[in-house]
Image (cartoon, rainbow, N blue to C red):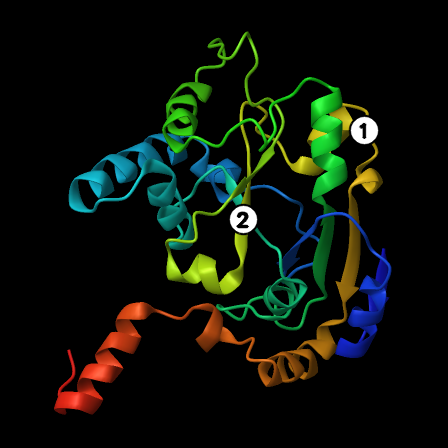
Amino acid sequence: MSKVSNYGEYIQELDGRGDVIVFRGQANSDFVLIPSGLRGEHIATADSQMFHFVDEMKHLFNFDELTCIEIAQHFALPTRMLDFSYSFDVALFFACHDTRGRYQEDDGKVFIFNKSKYEQMLKERGKLSSQVIRNNKFLYEWLQKYIDKESTMMGNKGIDMPIFIDATQQFDRLYMQRGLFLLWGRDECSFEKIMENEEIPISRFIDTITIAGEAKPGILKELAKKHISEDTLYMNVEKIKSLVKSIKYGATE
């Protein structure tokens, strides 16, 4: 782990990294890797709420189940998925930006996750990996059963370690953020604790960069020059349609 204080140093930190690397930014460097649905008061209700949301969305729109779960995630409904990005800049933005302003002065953190090495480890241990799950319908059927700790699927294999799921890119925020997810199954503790329980050194897959709190405003300004900002990452198609309509017809919705 290293701590740097300007944008240029972050870029230098990435030089020489190989394999498929994904990133996650968190505004407080003390936070561990755990999805919102497995935090505190959400544990008891997150699964049932998510499945209810998916069922309702399927009746309202012609989306597949995984897309519905992605939408739930990005509208802050607690789920078992944790957001990652293929873009370092996007992760750096989220490490510096706090919508509610609670951690703006705190040190942030960028997680640099070697997806290739992690999935190779899952394969070696006979675990499910993202290479196994490509059919959205199958994934959703599994999700409906994983809350039953006694259930078994795929020859007694369940998602007992988090796996990466590529986003469908049908949702504008995911497209802009180059998003993917780390999906939790039966193990309901943090990723760090899961690795500890499995006696796997987390340093095999993850490196971190701590972001000095006082450096966040300057880094955000540098990212804005590259069109990485709240406006671009949270781009809403409906807002754009409304703007076009107002320009063409002089009316707003």
Element type where label 2 sits in the image: strand
Residue closer to the observer: 131 or 121: 131
Q: Which residue is mark 1?
A: 200
Q: Amino acid at mark 2?
A: Leu
Report whether residue 190 is seen. yes
Q: How many marks?
A: 2
Q: Which of the numbered marks, if any, corresponds to residue 180? A: 2
Q: Is 82 drawn above or below residue 237 in the view shown?
A: above
Vertical placement of residue 104 versus 179, above or below: below
Give the residue at x 20% y 47%. 61
Q: Does residue 244 appear left or right of residue 134 in this picture?
A: left
Q: Which of the pair 167/148 is nearer the observer? A: 167
- The front one of 12 and 214 is 12
Amino acid bearing label 1:
Ile
Q: Residue at x 25, y 83 (%)?
A: 243
Query: Can residue 6 be seen at all in this image of the molecule?
Result: no
**In the displayed structure image, the side of residue 86 where residue 75 appears, left or right:** left
Nearer the viewer's eye, disc 2 or disc 1? 2
- State the SS at label 1: loop
* Label located before the other in sequence (2 or 1): 2
Quadrant of the frame with the N terminus: bottom right
Within the image, what quadrant is residue 208 found in?
bottom right
Could you tell me which residue is drawn at 77 percent across and 37 percent down? 117
Q: Answer left or right for 72 relative to 3.
A: left
